[in-house]
Each structure stands twice: as structure tokens, then as C-alpha cells.
Image (cartoon, helix red, strand yellow):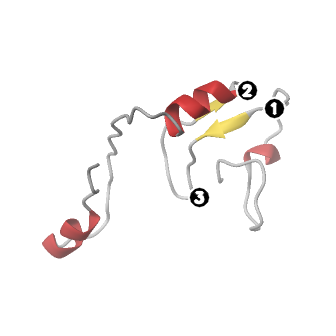
Amino acid sequence: MVSQFVSTHDVQLLGSLEFKFPEGIHAVGRLDNHSEGLLLLTTNKKVTRLLFLSETPHTRTYLVQVNNIVSSENLKNCKPELP
């Protein structure tokens, strides 16, 4: 399931669930088909702006599990650039 209510792709969406979501609800962030994690749903656009459009950056930490050995070269290419 993709953590969106609308998509141009033929995928299962949050709106496909048999649940009556409140008017104006949206996901803060997203999870793709094969991802797991916490997904915040809110009707408060201020929360989304604070997390994604704030002038003050916030730190995000991700835990990733992989099935194969990851080379040093691949790890080097995945490091985020710091502001």
C-alpha cells in the first residue's frame, strides 16, 4: 500500500481502506509499497508545514534493513549532504 490518497499509478492507496477518514486528512511524509514505518495522518496543515517547510531544519534518522551485502562504494554514494 502506498501512503497516499491519490496516485496516477495503479497501486493500493489509503483511500482504498474500509475506513471513513475525516475530511481534509493527509499523510505527513510517505511510505512506499515495500516500506514500513510510522505514518502521521493529520487534518492540520500547520503540522505538515512545520515538519517540511520550516526554516529550522530537523534531524531525521532512518533504520534500513537490506537483504544483500552493501559495498563501501554504495555506502559512500548514499551519505546525505549536510547543509
Q: Residue at x 76, y 47 (%)?
A: 5
Q: Secondary structure at mark 2?
A: loop
Camera-nearest residue between 57 and 59: 57
* First of labels 3, 1 by sequence position: 1
Nearer to us: label 3 or label 1 = 1
- The x, y position of residue 2, in whole percent, is 65, 53
Residue hosting label 1: 24
Residue 14 visible, this angle? yes
**Image quarter for residue 22?**
top right
Give the amino acid type for the residue marked by disc 3 in the picture.
Answer: Asn
The label on residue 33 is: 3
The label on residue 11 is: none
**Measured along the vertical axis of the image, is residue 78 above or below residue 30?**
below
Q: Residue at x 74, y 68 (%)?
A: 9
Q: Residues within 10 Å of mark 1 (few under 14, many from 20)?
A: few
**Image quarter for residue 10?**
bottom right
Q: Secondary structure at mark 1?
A: loop
Pointers 1 and 2 in contact (CB under 8 A)?
yes
Give the amino acid type for the residue marked by disc 2 in the picture.
Answer: Thr
Give the amino acid type for the residue marked by disc 1 in the picture.
Answer: Gly
Residue hosting label 2: 43
Pointers 2 and 3 in contact (CB under 8 A)?
no
